[in-house]
Amino acid sequence: METKPKPKAKPRKAARRKADPVRHWANYLRRYRPGLQRYVLDGLTTTYGEQVWEPRLDPTSELILTILTQNTADTNAEKAYQALRHAYPSDRDPEIHHPGMGWGGDGLPTEPPPDWTAVEFAPLPQLIDVIRPGGLGPQKAPRLQATLRHIREQRGDYSLAFLGDLPALEARDWLTRIDGIGKKTASIVLAFCFGMPVMAVDRHVERVSKRIGLLPPKANPDQAHDLFLGLLEPEEMYAAHVLLIHHGRVICHAQNPKHDLCPVRDRCRFVDKRAP
């Protein structure tokens, strides 16, 4: 008995490529809100001045100080870092803190950094007590020791100078492999210590950027760091971080922002939902 040939299978449609969210958002702003990034940076620069990069601290010191700033004010982190210096003194050269406008504290005095070996191997209850003035000592003390342990085990010492020789995103990935270190903390270290083109998005930067419309309203902090990479030129990222964080502290407050003093209000979607 003759069998009928099986019908040829219909060719499958090519799978649609998943859209790159970074490129998609950059294209959206370019099309519907052209020139917004430049307008914001120019307006904030006119108000607060040109921002010139200079290294802030040794990268290991910067990393530890940034961990101490997590969920607390910069002034409290300064107290905790100073306590580390005094409880675990080193014989290294004094470090100079160049806080700049992006820092919310008074700045650290010029003194040697802590002895990182002593910090890593300190009895945990003792270390908790030392950094208690900065807040959240029971959470941050184990994180400090785990961070220092990770660096030493991976590198043989506590130096992070090697990060300056890596591409920016590769250096960020190295840091975020440390438990408790996210993109924000890693980006702060890389931007302020090496001038790398990464964008640190803290609560002030996120709030201001979403209000203006530089970031999508539902973007989470992790996504926000990468979305900025598609919005800004590499040489703009340091200034953008410093200007946005300062603007969030002095004018674009979480409560009762000072719209009448805002230099970018004409294109801010928080002021006018239809702003261009």
Image: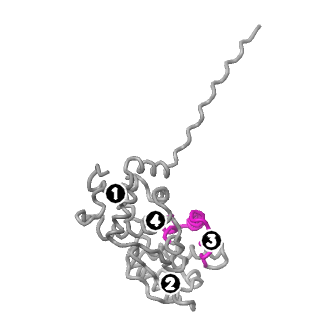
Measured Cα–Cα span from mark 4 to mark 2: 43 Å
Q: Is residue 142 left or right of residue 156?
A: left
As helix, strand or loop, the secondary structure at mark 1 comes to: helix
User: Counting other residues with Cα less than 10 Å from the Cα at mark 3, is it few (<14), some (14-19), or many (20 or more)?
Assistant: few
Inspect the image, locate mark 1, and give the three-letter code of the amino acid beneath it.
Ile
Q: Earlier in the sequence, mark 1 or mark 3?
A: 3
Instruction: Provide the residue designation for mark 4.
Output: 236
As helix, strand or loop, the secondary structure at mark 3 comes to: helix
Inspect the image, locate mark 2, and give the three-letter code of the amino acid beneath it.
Gln
As helix, strand or loop, the secondary structure at mark 4 comes to: helix
Q: Earlier in the sequence, mark 1 or mark 2?
A: 2
- Name the foreground residue: 35 vs 261: 35
Instruction: Provide the residue designation for mark 3.
Output: 165
User: Counting other residues with Cα less than 10 Å from the Cα at mark 4, is it few (<14), some (14-19), or many (20 or more)?
Assistant: some
Q: Residue 183's x, y, as percent? A: 51, 64
Measured Cα–Cα span from mark 4 to mark 3: 21 Å
The region drawn magenta spans 159-188
User: Counting other residues with Cα less than 10 Å from the Cα at mark 1, is it few (<14), some (14-19), or many (20 or more)?
Assistant: many
Instruction: Provide the residue designation for mark 2.
Output: 126
**Residue 212 circle label:** 1
